[in-house]
Image (tube, rainbow, N blue to C red):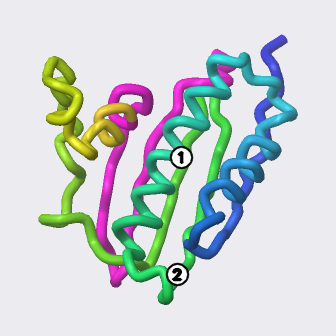
């Protein structure tokens, strides 16, 4: 008999300094009934932290003007289907960054400051899509963890 699927859940936070930590704690706690492996939990935490940090830093760059971040998760046989929406600034050019690997074969002082996050997200998550509709950003993805099939 296959393990039971976790019922869909939602959580909402307001962007800000502690928003990512709060969201990660609540998200991981909501997944506890499906008893993810340590590696799977690490994948979820890494991907979600990268996505949420990007929203806080880039969609809501003015810390004095925080905004909503809504997360929905549905557990299906092929993993966790996650949708994250915010009302912040749109992605540059209205599309996802390419997420190409950054060369680290350079002097320490020449390492790029950013660019690792989208590569990690697109490497660890599947079916990553971004859309901007009615002044709202929506990122959807599938995390291939907790699979039952």
Q: Residue 38: x percent and y percent?
A: 71, 18
Q: Nearer the viewer, residue 145 or 26?
A: 26
Q: Is residue 120 above or below residue 88?
A: above
Number of numbered labels in the structure image: 2
Q: Residue at x 24, y 52 (%)?
A: 96
Q: Is residue 122 rendered to the left or right of residue 91?
A: right
What residue occupies the far bottom of the structure in this picture? Answer: 65
According to the image, label 1 marks what residue?
Answer: 49
The magenta stretch is 121-149
Q: Where in the figure is residue 62, as x and y percent of width and height?
A: 40, 82
Q: Name the residue beneath numbered marker 2.
A: 67
* Percent position of residue 105, x then y: 16, 18
Q: Quadrant of residue 12?
A: bottom right
> The residue tagged with tag 2: helix, strand or loop?
loop
Tell me the quadrant of the picture where the C terminus can be found.
top right
Q: Residues within 10 Å of mark 1 (few under 14, many from 20)?
A: some
Tell me the quadrant of the picture where the N terminus can be found: top right
User: Is 146 part of what is drawn in magenta?
Assistant: yes
Q: Is residue 119 left or right of residue 149?
A: left
Give above or below for 56 relative to 14: above
Residue at 32% in and 56% down? 130
Q: Which mark is residue 24?
A: none
Quadrant of the rendered image containing residue 108:
top left
Q: Relative to 137, say whether 34 is above or below.
A: above
Q: Earlier in the sequence, mark 1 or mark 2?
A: 1
Q: Front-most of 21 and 71?
A: 21
């Amino acid at each position: 008999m296959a393990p039971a699927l976790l019922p869909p859940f939602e959580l909402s936070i307001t962007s800000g300094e502690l928003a990512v930590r709060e969201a990660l704690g609540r998200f991981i706690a909501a997944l506890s009934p499906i008893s993810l492996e340590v590696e799977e939990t690490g994948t979820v935490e890494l991907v979600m932290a990268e996505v949420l940090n990007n929203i806080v830093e880039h969609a809501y760059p003015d810390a004095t003007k925080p905004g909503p971040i809504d997360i929905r998760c549905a557990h299906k046989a092929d993993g966790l289907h996650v949708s994250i929406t915010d009302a912040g600034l749109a992605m540059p050019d209205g599309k996802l960054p390419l997420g190409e690997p950054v060369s680290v074969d350079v002097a320490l002082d020449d390492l790029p400051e950013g660019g690792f996050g989208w590569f990690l997200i697109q490497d660890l998550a599947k079916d990553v899509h971004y859309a901007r509709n009615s002044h709202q950003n929506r990122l959807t993805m599938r995390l291939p963890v907790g699979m039952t099939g």
